[in-house]
Image (spheres, rainbow, N blue to C red):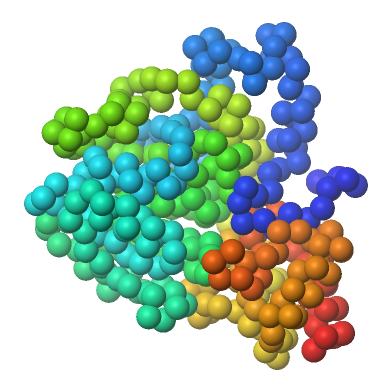
Amino acid sequence: MNHPDRVDNFNGGPAALPLEALQKAQAELLNFNGTGISMLELGHRTKAYAAVHQNAKDLLRQLLKVPNDYDILFLQGGASLQFAMLPMNYLTPERSGAYALTGSWSKKALDEAKRVGPTRVAFDGKPDGYRQIPPADTIAVNPSDAYLHVTSNNTIVGSQWKAFPDTGSVPLVADMSSDILSRAIDVSKFAMIYAGAQKNLGPAGVTVVIVKKSFVEQSTAIADERNLSVMLRYDQYAANDSLYNTPPVFAIYVVGLVLEWLAAQGGVEAAADLGRRKADLVYGAIDASSGFYQGHCVPEGRSTTNVTFRLPTPELDKAFLAAAEENGLVGLGGHRSVGGCRASLYNAVSLDACERLVEFMDSFRRVNG
């Protein structure tokens, strides 16, 4: 659905949200579900909010086929807090955190873990500029690993795991902030999945954690030993259904609206099919440009969610971004740490928007190539 007042939003996050979800939030803003008050004012221990909270959990469980022996938690602090909270709850002098470094965010996760306890690097892609994802079967785990941490999709460099390592008895933990709900995954292979909402799930302000109940139980003794604050303990969030303190009520409400929209579109399977079509369009324009547009990652490791590329010179990068914005294509600048260009193709970005982007790319290349 298009709207005459809206541009094509390719921002990396906070990112595009479905227009239908925004319109429903707008319609209910002053009077949510007959309560006479806004969701922004609604108490988190009311029956009205309890239904919203449960609806978001139920939809996420349905769309990702989350097994019953997993908890779904709503936290705050983004993925960045999870970088620290995970090792706080699981690392000991005898148990190290293993990290596969495929981009800046996985490196930040490792850096936080180093503050807490022993770590090791299971893979380091930095020498190659994070241009590729290692084959899943080349990532080795040790019996002493508390977990193996991976970042499923790397927004800055535009790479993505197509298959995940088989870690056996070692828990597999994934930061899926940027590609959760964009493809089907077998949740049962992971001890924990966490995701900042501001890309595919909803607005900034809430972080979803999907965690196996037995993995939560493993954290209790370590959290007790560290005398961790309640607000940093997974077992306390699970025991209190994420309601120990005031959760980000409005953000969770919008997550529910986004999940309702996704279910109506055909769910994760439909999103994956559309995502491949969108990515194929944009990568096709890059590959057909005779080097005018230069993709960062090797083709087999390319992300279907974040397409990164550069033009022949920094000056052309700037001209491209300025002209794109003039044409209603916004958010195409690369991450501030690397520059260049990036088209983020999250679920709410339409195929029509990608077609308009490709038309612009072809036109800009003809004039400037």
59 to the left or right of 71: right
Q: Position of residue 338 (x, y in %)?
A: 56, 71
**In this rendering, does residue 84 appear at all?**
yes
Lateral position of residue 247 relative to residue 167, left or right: right
Q: Nearer the viewer, residue 206 or 274?
A: 206
x%, y% of residue 16? 69, 48
Q: Is residue 214 left or right of residue 134?
A: left
* Residue sitting at x 21%, y 44%: 90
Residue at the image position 80 percent from the left and 89 percent from the top: 369
Residue lying at 41% horizontally and 72% vertically, measured from the top left: 133
The answer to whether residue 95 is above or below residue 76 is below
Question: From the viewer's perspective, is 88 left or right of 202?
Answer: left
Q: Which residue is situated farthest in the right direction here?
A: 4
The quarter holding residue 240 reads top left
Q: At which x and y percent is residue 23? A: 77, 33
Q: Is residue 301 above or below residue 202?
A: below
Task: Name the residue at 58% across, 40% down.
Answer: 204
Image quadrant in which you'd find residue 118: bottom left
Q: Is residue 58 visible?
A: no
217 relative to 190, above or below:
above
Q: How many marks?
A: 0
Q: Provide residue 277's location: percent of width, then percent of height.
A: 66, 65
